[in-house]
Image: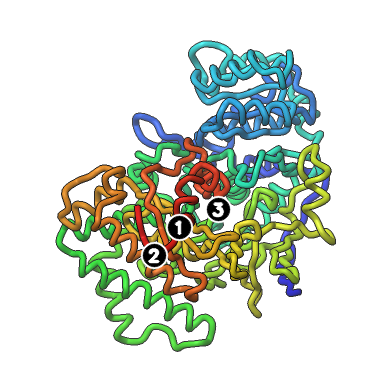
Amino acid sequence: MREASTGLLVELDPDSNVTDLLLAQHAKDPVHPLYSRKGPAGWTDVSAQQFLGQVTALAKGLIAGGIAPGETVAVMAGTRYEWTVVDFAIWFAGGVTVPIYETSSASQVEWILHDSGARRVFAENQARADLVQAVLDTSELLGDRLVPVVRMEYDGGAPNLGSLAAAGTGVGDAELERHRATAGLADVASLVYTSGTTGRPKGCEITHGNFALVARNIVLFLPEILLQPHSRTLMFLPLAHVLARAVQVICLSAGTTLGHTSSAKELLEDLSSFRPTFLLVVPRILEKVYAGAAHKAALAGKQRLFGAAAAVAVDYSKALDAAAQGTGPGPGLASRAKHAMFDRLLYPKLRQAFGGQLGYTVSGASPLSSHDAHFFRGAGIPVLEGYGLTETTAPCTANTPRRTKVGTVGIPVPGTTIRIADNGEILVRGIGVFKGYHANAAANAESFVDGFFRTGDLGSLDGDGFLTITGRKKDLLVTAGGKNVAPGPLEEKIREHLLVGQAVVLGDGRPFVSALVNLDPEGLENWCALHKVPAMGVAEATSHELVRAAIQGAVDQANSLVSRAESIRVFVILAADFTVESGHLTPSLKLKRAAVVRDFETHINRIYAEPSPQARG
């Protein structure tokens, strides 16, 4: 059993809560821009004073509406500035925020409202409000509970944020302060429901201490990112996910100016105009940026040049790693010369796609391939990969600018201990570990051992305290021949191919390992143009000879990472897409393996019914 720890850097008054972070920023500099809002004329800064005023006005409206300290209030919306205002207003009123993904189905909304006991719902727009109201009107589970629905807009039909704020004008500052100061660090600030990759969502009780202690300590843990003059970041990940919420509170504590965008189509445009200094991403975003850059180079007849630039970036980054770890001399003279050349010719164009001011990207939610990590660092966009779960208020380990090992998820964040159990499971204890699952004693009993949270993930710690994720206990495949296979590395390698959307490796209890692969529509379009193949739809492509050969090449590359007993013998190309809406991806773009296996059982059975393994569509 191995452990690694990082000591706490900041302690907080146990009677304080998350709202004190906002009050501290306001006291420090009331005109400092904490947020920036996108409008028709571009981005408009929102000062600490303006934000605090909007928050307290809504909080008074909630109090006038009868909210009692400790009551739960649900929020169903995409990532937007109003989400943040409502979140802090709920906390100032003494309430507990319950996020609901804007993509949630009626049955998911019903379950979360029931399990959390929410007394009010904020809905992003009329369409979301109508969905919630339909659930309330027809649900037997919720009974006759009165749950007012408020649209997250300041005008239009009531009730909305404007009418809510107007209703609170009679609430005095003393009454507001009484509500605000009710919660301490040990009290629940938010019920965040798991994404449901392994069953029905469970409500994680995230405390004020989880949010506030993680925020204050991460700021000092990553000063090169968070304490730089004019630090800015653009949030586009769903705020219903604890990672985005935690980072948002971290930014508030640091005084980082934060903007919001929920439109994937407008992301590159928003990055260009907002010009963030750092960015929180998930690996799929970086994969798409890399694939897009390679495609543009190919269309311009510069495929070989881009390939050389990518190879130089990767080699340069690997040499930096070797020097940092004392296993090599660092980039040599030839490597530095080639890198300097491409740093004039090609890498700046990639950096410009992120706005031109990006110093670091922070990657989480799922594994990032080491190739992509080395490429982006070599191209001047260092990627700091971290690890965490909803139950750890997101980050429990992270690489830092000063301590980075590509291929790992870093060292424990301050106030955190990572332990590797005898069976390889990662156990976590520390300031981010949640209070427990809401009204679920059985799950709590199963999830903790000796004060540590059992993550369900498998990993290893090296001598320097860096954590490497090797798989997930529930995902680990054991073939009929008794061979243990971790599907993650194989899936990551296949997913690097331009054509591939997702890959799902199978083989538990089966005679050999197989895979389901689906195609990325945009990647398919780019691949056809690149290879001068007539444009085709996904359905046609699943049986196209050249497409199948390309996927076979991706599978062969993945197989080169493992022994023959662990290698993929058969793959099937699916015409279906895996999306959040289809139920096969979580809102943070993690694969719901059980849902895929259930929904494509016919394809899987066909794989193992054939007597001779061979690639087929």
Looking at the rendered structure, the kind of residue marked 3 is: Ala
Q: Secondary structure at mark 3?
A: loop
Q: How dense is the environment of label 1, judged by Cα within 10 Å: few (below 14), some, or many (20 and up)?
A: many
Between the C-alphas of marks 3 and 1, the distance is: 22 Å
Is residue 478 toward the left or the right of residue 155 in the image? right
Q: From the viewer's side, name the closer residue of 63 and 228.
A: 63
Q: Is residue 224 above or below residue 163?
A: below
Of labels 2 and 1, earlier in sequence is: 1
- Give residue 559's quadrant in the image: bottom left
Q: Is residue 122 above or below residue 611?
A: above
Q: From the viewer's side, name the closer residue of 520 and 384.
A: 520
Of labels 3 and 1, earlier in sequence is: 3
Q: From the viewer's side, name the closer residue of 360 and 300.
A: 300
Residue drawn at 80 percent across, 55 percent down: 448
Looking at the rendered structure, the kind of residue marked 2 is: Val
Residue drawn at 53 percent across, 23 percent down: 128
Q: Is mark 2 in CB contact (under 8 Å) with mark 1? A: yes
Kindly identify which numbered label has been placed on residue 515: 1
Between the C-alphas of marks 2 and 1, the distance is: 9 Å
Q: Is mark 3 in CB contact (under 8 Å) with mark 1? A: no
Residue drawn at 71 percent across, 68 percent down: 6
- The nearer-to-camera label among 3 and 1 is 1
Residue linked to disc 2: 555
Residue linked to disc 3: 365
Between the C-alphas of marks 3 and 2, the distance is: 24 Å
Q: How dense is the environment of label 2, judged by Cα within 10 Å: few (below 14), some, or many (20 and up)?
A: many
Q: How dense is the environment of label 3, judged by Cα within 10 Å: few (below 14), some, or many (20 and up)?
A: many
Location of residue 233 in the rendering, given as x and y in whole percent from the top left corner? 48, 49
- The nearer-to-camera label among 3 and 2 is 2
Q: Secondary structure at mark 1?
A: strand
Looking at the rendered structure, the kind of residue marked 1 is: Ala
